[in-house]
Image: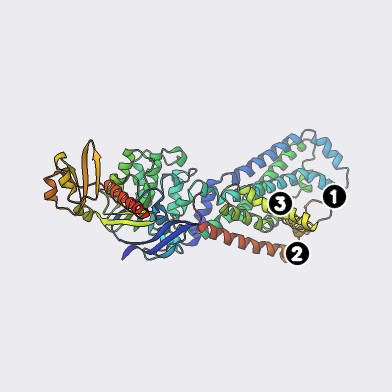
Amino acid sequence: MACIEARGLRKAYGSTIALDGIDLHIEEGRILGLVGPNGAGKSTALHAILGLIPYEGDLTVMGRNPWTERDQLMCDVSFIADVAVLPRWIRVAQVIDFVAGIHPRFDRGKAEGFLAKTNIKRTSKVRELSKGMVTQLHLALVMAIDAKLLVLDEPTIGLDILVRKQFYDSLLNDYFDRSRTIVVTTHQIDEIQDVLTDVMFINNGRIVFGCSMEEFEARYVEVMVNPENVAAARALGPIHERQVFGRSILLFDQADRQQLATLGDVRTPSIADLFVAVMGNSANQANGAAQ
Amino acid sequence: MTPLSEKTSFYWSVRRELWENRSLYIAPLLVGFVAMFALAVSTVGIVERRRDVLLLDPAQQRARIAVPYDAAAAVLIITAFIVGIFYCLDALYGERRDRSILFWKSLPVSDRTTVLSKATIPMIVLPAIIFPIIIVTQFWMLLISSAVLASSGLAGTTWTRFNLIEHSLILLYLLPTLALWHAPIYAWLLLVSAWAKRATFLWAVMPFVVVSVFERIAFGTSYFGLMLRYRVAGYTAVAFALKANTPIDSLSQLTPGRFLTTAGLWGGLILTAIFLAAAVRLRRNREPI
């Protein structure tokens, strides 16, 4: 069964179109990274999936309609919007009591076990905790919920790199198993490149690119071309070219690796590099069409 | 898996409100202490005053001696009303302003349970909180005054003229019926707090001011203003049979039959249901501000 299934998902705020008819098919057990510039429609898509906003089109999450069945859906779905959403007035012990009280799939022992490894005091209020601690607390709550789908919308925004690393390590080692599905948006996409099984680019409310990471690694190759070979490399039809320290780095889609290896250093590109290439090309096309 | 029973999530949602809004019980407790302290101050010279009062006719004695106790009850009821108003204005607005609505909505609690648990606070929880606070405050006030009067043998003169048992029974009628009477006010405030993007108090009050002024200028009448006054302050005339300027001091003044058959009560309750249903719908598609 697909975990998330969308057909022609559309959302407009007045005359602004946030989602322009997107189709999604996300299988169980995947870790999908949703990448896009600010205002591309990432959060809108996630909010529709979580039943936080009404939408047009067909959308099924875990076999349910998120807009009409949000409360039931939230038994199977966990959600971290960003670090700032835990209420600041609540005490650590209170938030654990509350979630334990209302969530049928919450395992209090697990949450407390996770918190025991941190410096978070049970009597502290959220407002007294550092940003990193609030994230740890939220993560402890979410990881103690035996959910099928976890949605993370910029979960590590404003955190330092150490906490960000811990966050994803805990998520992978203590939480993820092959039966869960995770959808994550983040601006620090390169940090989670190894974590993802799938990646999707979204721009202007449309999905402009999507593939699995195996496909990504098989298809795309980046070459730091030796200066004397630049013309030869360009002749092979790179989809993007950039300069770093005076050397050209060319990005190829489905090229012969052995042939490229003769022209320079070959490596797998980062998602961010491909993102820039794909977005840059679509922007050029748009400009071309306008002219 | 389905959510836990509505009852369980409702129970925890109400507890959650009490964690967040400690003023719900701290404000009445403080006012209760102030009333006790004020009574202690008033005991200076009480013996002479009491001797003078005892020369009056029995009805006047009762009225004069009961004044501080009635005042304590009244001020606590007004405190609960004000606390309830400010609670409601923030209840569905604060969670959007601090973005915590995204956290609450990530949990399997329906919008209906959330809104109803918030409506429960002014309509049921606050009356239940102030009932014991009023009784305990009055009891201590009685003890303080008796202790001072005891030396002159007048200790019993307060207890016989302010009957705490009968007074408690009156409160057991007054507090729930008052809550029902004011229910549409609280429900309106909850609706505004679910809707407004800022300045909830202005949005809650201004429509009434505008309509009243319009009616006054356009038609020269003030029916709308009278209707508002009836809702805010018309309660005692409906729920009690009182002669002019007499205090509520006897169970014989209760008029539950008239209260329950007043159209204003049922009209108000219908409005309450409409406002709350609208607040549930609004909360469903509200996002952080």
Q: Is residue B280 left or right of residue A62?
A: right
The quadrant of the rendering that contains the N terminus of chain A is bottom left
- Residue B225 picture location, percent across and down: 75, 55
Image x and y of residue A185, in percent: 35, 50
Q: In which quarter of the view is residue B217 placed?
A: bottom right
SS of the residue under disc 1: helix
Q: Which residue is mark 1?
A: B59
Q: Sequence order check: which comes first, mark 1 or mark 3?
A: 1
Residue matched to label 2? B258
Q: Amino acid at mark 2?
A: Arg
Instruction: Mark 1 and mark 3 in contact? Answer it, CB < 8 Å.
Output: no
Q: Which mark is residue A145?
A: none
Q: Secondary structure at mark 3?
A: helix
The chain that hosts pointer 2 is B
Instruction: Determine the chain carrying the residue at label 1.
Output: B
Identify the mark nearer the N-term, 3 or 2.
3
Residue B233 visible, this angle: no
- Of badges 2 and 1, the one in the foreground is 2
Q: Which residue, given by chain and number where applicable, does mark 3 sit on?
A: B209
Is B137 on the left or on the right of A24, as rendered? right
Residue under the point 59% across and 53% down: B121
Chain letter for the residue marked with disc 3 in the picture: B
Asked if the residue at tag 1 contacts the one at tag 2, i.e. Cβ–Cβ closer than 8 Å, the answer is no
Is B168 positioned to the left or the right of B122 in the image? right
Whole-Å distance between the Cαs marked 3 and 2? 30 Å
Same-chain status of marks 1 and 3: yes
